[in-house]
Image (cartoon, rainbow, N blue to C red):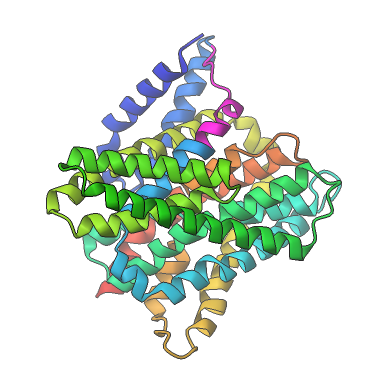
Amino acid sequence: MLSTVALFAILLLFAMLIEPLAERLKLPFSSFLVIVGFAGSELIVMMGFDTGLRWYEFVDIILHLLVPIIIFESAFNANFKALISNLPAVLFLAVPAMLCAALLTGVLIFWGIGSAEHFPLLTALLAGVILSATDPVAVVAIFKKLGAPDRLNALLEGESLFNDVTVIVVYSILVSVSLNPEVDLTMTDATLIFTQSLVGGVLVGIVIAYVARYLYGWCSGHFRHTLLGIIAAIVSFYVAEHWLAVSGVVAVLSAGLVLGEFCRKKPQGDHLFAGEFWELNAYIANAILFILVGVTVTVSMFSSQWLAMLVGIGAATVVRFAVVYGLFPVFCLLPRVEPSDKHYKQVLMWGGLRGAVSLALALSIPVEIEGWYTVQSIVYAVVTFTLFVQAPFMDRLVMKTIK
């Protein structure tokens, strides 16, 4: 049996070696990671070896390590001032618009598949929630290269940052309901749990971040300050998730935002070192996730679930269009809300890629849930569509926006 760690190391090394090819073809590196993971695992199996990789063994690592790292890095390196100035629009896209999108996507998928016995409405709603997590990593890289407006960058990155944690909270509630059908959970109860989880996570993250800020004065040097950031991320997640039963990822998000802004006001070397350190961690976490997806994708998945995959792609695209061109312009009519530029809407629509968080949640679906494999297949299909169809056109779209 091949060592899982060795397999990942080999696949990741090979992917890094061909990364220049991805840049030349204007494809996200994550696209190549999926291809390498799929081709590498298929080749190993054809040679008669067992990869030793069982995706369900990675659930705890994905939800309790990889996702928190990705969330903390995004928060720590976010443009805090641009985010705050666009906070109303960002929160609208990340919470009410996301909840509407999840509901509409789930209902469309349920109707499209049309098999309530094998794919119940609750499972369809779970798919809708997972597909509502956006990941603009590839788009943000283009923004940095071409110099996109701060507002556009803040809207796309801020929406992703906040709706990721919203998606994870709602996902946890739906999984709990699916696994415990005997529990009568009303809409009021669900709303209360959702609110407590979000507010509790925010408070935990802020408190621990301010404790870390206080401890900064007791030590010097960017190594120690970065170590304090690591400890703050770990402690905020653990205290929120395991002691107070609130959202750990929300706590990590809050801690990352507070510490990131604080570090930017310290000597330049501190923030640069810590920012690059967390970028490396997030790079590794994303790489592991996309390789894991490539390894777990099978040819039979596409032959047996092709209809569900097409329904999922269609539903996710239609609902994203409805949110960006329908809900968001209405919100922008409110007083003191900056109107939405038509070019911005094009980028928001086409740049709503699905990535790491959607994949992480798809890989974490309990197999006890009816239709779990169909949900996983749908998410894989939508992520593949965004990586190989949407992402390659982003360069031209952003160029039109910044002219």
Q: Residue at x 60, y 53 (%)?
A: 169
Viewer-proximal residue among 284 and 13: 284
Q: Residue at x 33, y 73 (%)?
A: 151
Question: Within the magenta stretch, is there residue 377?
Answer: no
State which quadrant residue 35 falls in.
top left
Q: Is residue 310 visible?
A: no
Above or below, 43 against 152 in this view is above
In the drawing, does residue 265 fall left or right of residue 62?
A: left
Question: Could you tell me which quadrant the C terminus lies in?
Answer: bottom left
x, y percent for residue 34: 45, 36
Q: Is residue 36 visible?
A: yes
Question: Within the magenta stretch, is there residue 58?
Answer: yes
x, y percent for residue 223: 20, 38
In the drawing, does residue 187 fall left or right of residue 274?
A: right
Above or below, 215 against 133 in this view is above
Q: How many marks?
A: 0
Viewer-proximal residue among 208 and 356: 208
Q: Residue at x 80, y 43 (%)?
A: 180
Above or below, 61 against 356 in this view is above
Q: Residue at x 13, y 53 (%)?
A: 268
x, y percent for residue 276: 23, 44
Magenta portion: prevailing SS class: helix
Viewer-proximal residue among 72 and 211: 211
Above or below, 200 against 69 in this view is below
x, y percent for residue 348: 44, 68
Viewer-proximal residue among 168 and 198: 198
In magenta, the rendered stretch is 50-62
In the drawing, does residue 282 fall left or right of residue 388?
A: left
